[in-house]
């Protein structure tokens, strides 16, 4: 039996790090069936867009419907649906998943923080914001 969850050092975690044995699409379908008891929504019906955020060193989506559910998201399957509440606010359909355009440099700034709990990013925060936070906490800049 493989471990239920794991982490990959030196990167912001995605589904593929936490659940390397089950792809996000199949994982979501399994969870949907377990929570909702119905066939999972399909990509062809996808509507709406949700933004991934970084929370404690993980890329995730907070349920847009406000059920307080959250799910680590995938590098390999660019969709999200809340398996816990079924995303009724989106007609029970998949959302398309959006990562920030400046993902890589922002990740590099977050990865300079040794404590994963401080690796956080939300929509609207800029690289300059992250750099200022790093500076405020005495975290070394890159280049060496
Ligand atoms: Zn939800």
Image (cartoon, rainbow, N blue to C red):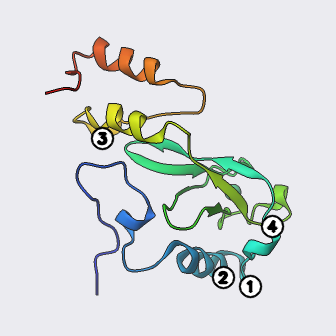
Going 28% across and 82% down the picture, which residue do you hit? 2
Q: In which quarter of the image is residue 140?
A: top left
Q: Please tell me which residue is depicted at 80% across the width and 67% down the height of the picture.
A: 92
Looking at the image, the residue that sits furthest to the left is 144
- Which residue carries the number 2 mark? 33
For label 4, the residue is: 92
Which residue is at 37% across, 44% downward? 57
Q: Estimate the spatial distance between the alpha carbons at disc 3 and disc 1, rounded to whole Å.
A: 36 Å
Residue 61 in the image, given as x and y percentages of width and height: 58, 50
Q: Which of marks 4 and 2 is in front?
A: 4
The residue that mark 1 highlights is 39
**Going 30% across and 41% down the picture, which residue do you hit?**
116
Q: Do the residues labelled 2 and 3 touch (CB within 8 Å)?
A: no
> Whole-Å distance between the Cαs marked 2 and 1?
6 Å
Q: Distance between the residues labelled 3 and 4?
A: 33 Å
Q: In which quarter of the image is residue 15?
A: bottom left
Quadrant (top left/top right/bottom left/bottom right) for the C terminus: top left
Give the mark nearest the N terminus, 4 or 1: 1
**Labelled disc at residue 116:** 3
Sequence order check: which comes first, mark 3 or mark 1? 1
Q: In which quarter of the image is ligand 1?
A: bottom right
Lower sequence index among marks 2 and 1: 2
Disc 4 + disc 2, Cβ < 8 Å: no
Q: Which mark is residue 132?
A: none
Q: Do tag 4 and tag 1 residues touch (Cβ < 8 Å)? A: no
Q: State how far apart marks 4 and 2 are (Cα).
A: 13 Å
Q: What element carries label 2?
A: helix
- What separation in Å lies between label 2 and label 3 (alpha carbons)? 32 Å
**In terms of sequence position, does the residue under pointer 3 or pointer 4 come before the other?**
4
Mark 2 near mark 1, Cβ–Cβ under 8 Å?
yes
Assign a secondary structure to mark 1.
loop
Sequence order check, earlier mark of 4 and 2? 2
């Amino acid at each position: 039996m493989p471990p239920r969850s794991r982490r990959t050092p030196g990167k912001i975690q995605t589904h593929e790090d936490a659940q390397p044995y089950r792809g996000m699409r199949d994982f979501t379908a399994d969870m949907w069936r377990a929570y909702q008891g119905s066939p999972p929504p399909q990509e062809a019906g996808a509507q709406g867009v949700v933004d991934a955020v970084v929370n404690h060193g993980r890329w995730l989506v907070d349920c847009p419907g406000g059920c307080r559910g959250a799910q680590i998201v995938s590098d390999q399957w660019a969709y999200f649906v809340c398996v816990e509440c079924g995303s009724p606010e989106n007609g029970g359909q998949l959302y398309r998943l959006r990562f920030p355009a400046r993902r890589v440099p922002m990740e590099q700034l977050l990865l300079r923080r040794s404590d994963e709990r401080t690796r956080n990013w939300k929509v609207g925060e800029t690289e300059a914001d992250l750099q200022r936070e790093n500076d405020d906490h005495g975290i070394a800049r890159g280049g060496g």
